[in-house]
Amino acid sequence: MLLEKPVPGLKERLAARIASEGPLTVEAYMQACLSDDAHGVYAAQQPIGAAGHFITAPEISQIFGELIGLWAVSVWQRMGEPRPLTVIELGPGRGTLLADAIRAWRVMPRFLEAVWVALVETSPRLTAIQRETLDDVPVPLQWHANLEDVPKGPAVLIANEFIDALPIRQFVRRGDAWRERLVASGDAGGFVIAEGALSEGVEGLLAAHTDRVPEGAIVECRPAMKHLLHAMATRSNEAPLAALIVDYGHDASGFGDTLQAVRQHKYADPLAEPGSADLTAHVDFAELKRLATELGLKTYGPMPQGAFLLRLGLEIRRDRLLAAARPEHREAIASGAARLMDPEQMGVLFKVVAFASPELAPPPPFADPDFPLSSPPSTPSPL
Ligand code: SAH
């Protein structure tokens, strides 16, 4: 019998890589921790939910996916109801948001006939879970590894907690010059942060920050976000596109180290035990908007998640669910809804921005201050 050789742990392999190639950029380290085939948090594990490392809005309350589903319908109507319409979700996790959105679409048969869904996902493990969750939905589904691979055409794009998982690079100001923060092997074993020379082409990008931040300040950038926005702008040049980005982060570009690790719902050291904790970094919404505008997209927001959901009709939907629920489910419905909008919880740290092709009307609820959805779904659904 042939026994497969066990794959060494990620920590050992990263240490060997550093010994042969030298220290890694924070980007390469984050990429490996999240996407390593054998041990990456997304690629090889199931990180979302009570049994995983972190919980996300669609896993907290079905209302989140339902309201975003209705948002997509409303945007489609404002586009002039093109057929077919692609709803693209970037990083669909366990497929929960889509399952809730598609259930909400049942109130609009015209939309159900027009729509197909593209799931952009790189993790084989999560793809398998998405297939299971969405096994019996009444719309065609396709999986793709990149946004660029999704067939052209009018589209509504959704990304919840996707950008925070895209790897970042970190730079530190030393006098008038900049150094890149790197992950190196420490003398006592394990990994430590070191500083190295800038690679070619980065210096120009950092020059603008030199007068803005003090000595020793850390500035982050996210190459994959730029790449993503290019792909969105290209789509938008070819056919109408509206996109909804929900994530956590800051309104204004700041400085400081925002790389964070969460292991089984608790903050952890990002350098300890790579592959055993989720790694994310704050989204710089100002930069996101600036880049999108530069690429010709119209941008709306950021609006705090709580305000966004309230204006989409969260309380109406919650009350309908409560009225139809069994007594033992009521507490979970009420507390889930509160958690999404409470300023102390996800209501303010999480923010929503929308992008749209310039010829499209502003998407709700950014332009119309009293936009409540006139017909939230009325079919009660099991939790
Ligand atoms: N949107 C989901 C999951 C968020 S976790 C939710 O709200 O529950 C991030 C998701 O993005 C995971 O599904 C992960 O596998 C996927 N992902 C991370 N990096 C990716 C990339 N570069 N391309 C495609 N999917 C990616």
Image (cartoon, rainbow, N blue to C red):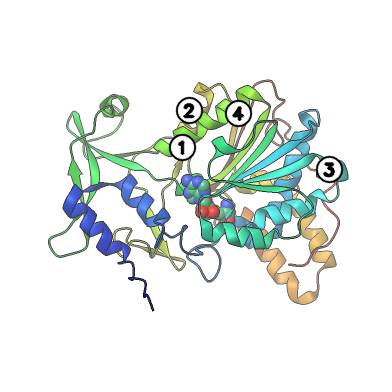
Point out the frontmost of discs 1 and 4.
Answer: 4
Instruction: Say whether disc 2 or disc 4 marks the residue closer to the N-terminus.
Output: 4
Tell me the SS state at disc 4.
helix
Instruction: Say whether disc 2 or disc 3 marks the residue closer to the N-terminus.
Output: 3
Q: Residue furthest left?
A: 187
Is 56 rendered above or below residue 222? Answer: below
Label 2 beta carbon less than 8 Å to ligand 1:
no
Dot 2 amino acid type: Leu
Of residue 378 and residue 183, the one placed in the foreground of this image is 183
- The residue tagged 3 is 113
Q: Are marks 1 and 2 in contact (CB under 8 Å)?
A: yes
Q: Are marks 3 and 4 in contact (CB under 8 Å)?
A: no
Dot 4 amino acid type: Arg
- The residue tagged 2 is 291
Tell me how far mark 1 sits from mark 3, CA to CA. 32 Å
Residue 370 in view: no
Tell me how far mark 2 sits from mark 3, CA to CA. 35 Å
Residue 44 in view: yes
User: Which percent across, then down, holds residue 72?
Assistant: 73, 41
Instruction: Say whether disc 1 or disc 2 marks the residue closer to the N-terminus.
Output: 1
